[in-house]
Image (cartoon, grey):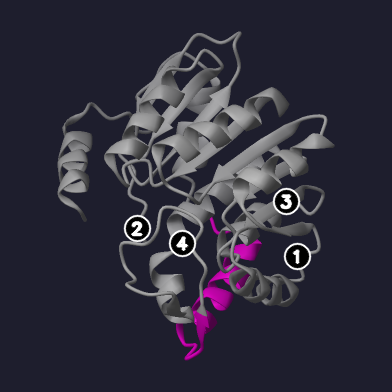
Amino acid sequence: MSWFQIKAYLSYWGKKKYKQGDMISPSLAEELINHVFYEELPYYHYHLINDIRNDLLQSRKQIVVSDLGAGSKKFNDNKRSIRGLVKYNASPRKQGELIARLVSFFKPELIIELGTSLGIGSLYLALPNSKAQIHTIEGCKNLAEQAGINFQIAQAKNIKQHIGNFREILPVVLKNMDGVDMVYFDGHHDYLATMDYFQVCLPKAAPGAVFIFDDIYWSEGMAKAWQEITAHASVAVSFDLFRFGIVILNKEIKKQHYVLNWSWRG
């Protein structure tokens, strides 16, 4: 962790947390906290994704990565091992499984992911609902090719890959959509980029759309972006899990913000 992340982590643990059973009045937030965030029953596809993750962790393969985002705090050059990318870049198991439960709960039909990497996060989005269409964007061709192999192994036929710069590809992907139901912002972790992609997605967001932001305390810029996003008029409900954040868009609902006592590790 950087010094900023250490301070942010200490601040996070100093905030009042909401846990299961804390809220009395029935609400969407209560249902999510009590029946989605803390659900421990395994879904059928968890094992498949874990098998793919474990195989990648054993890989000796190295690939050259062209990083179009905010760079890496773990790698000093562009030649990176598959196992290293899984260890440091892939969605952690517990975080991925929560995202999969959100997909099962909300049943989004159109999902966009910014940052495919090796495709682990994409599989958590795709496998819970085969009727959903996932559009995942990756700036690095070599990473996208490896992700494509993992999609074939998982037989995830509802994922469409796009390769290129987010700023160029995202508007093209959104252009022909009537409404996007879920967006996973999992790449280019800096303030300006995150706010830009958020603003680009907003006009296409379906009522009740769910936006997920990875690494919300990756830097001061990301923390600032998260603060501004949760304060945005379109955001009704927001959940701070430190490692990542979730917002639900609905101008008709009174704004609610929750800091959850939830560990992403595991």
Give the residue at mark 2: 265
Name the disc covering residue 93, or none.
Answer: 4
Under circle 2, the secondary element is loop
**Residue type marked 3:** His
Magenta-tinted stretch? 41-63
Tell me whether circle 1 and circle 3 mark residues in contact (CB < 8 Å).
no
Q: Position of residue 23 (x, y in %)?
A: 39, 20
Give the residue at mark 3: 135
Which residue shows up at 55% across the image and 64% down it? 117
Under circle 4, the secondary element is helix
6 vs 255, left or right, is left
Which residue shows up at 51% across the image and 37% down it? 35
The residues bearing labels 1 and 3 have C-alpha atoms spaced at a distance of 12 Å
Q: Position of residue 79 (x, y in %)?
A: 44, 80
Q: Is residue 246 above or below residue 120?
A: above
Tell me whether circle 4 and circle 1 mark residues in contact (CB < 8 Å).
no
Tell me whether circle 2 and circle 4 mark residues in contact (CB < 8 Å).
no
The answer to whether residue 206 is seen in the rendering is: no
Closest to the camera, between mark 2 and mark 3, is 3
Quadrant placement of the N terminus: bottom left
Which quadrant of the view contains residue 249?
top right
Give the residue at mark 1: 156
The residues bearing labels 3 and 4 have C-alpha atoms spaced at a distance of 21 Å
The residues bearing labels 4 and 1 have C-alpha atoms spaced at a distance of 18 Å
The answer to whether residue 64 is seen in the rendering is: yes
Q: Residues within 10 Å of mark 4 (few under 14, many from 20)?
A: some
Q: Earlier in the sequence, mark 1 or mark 3?
A: 3
8 vs 134, left or right, is left
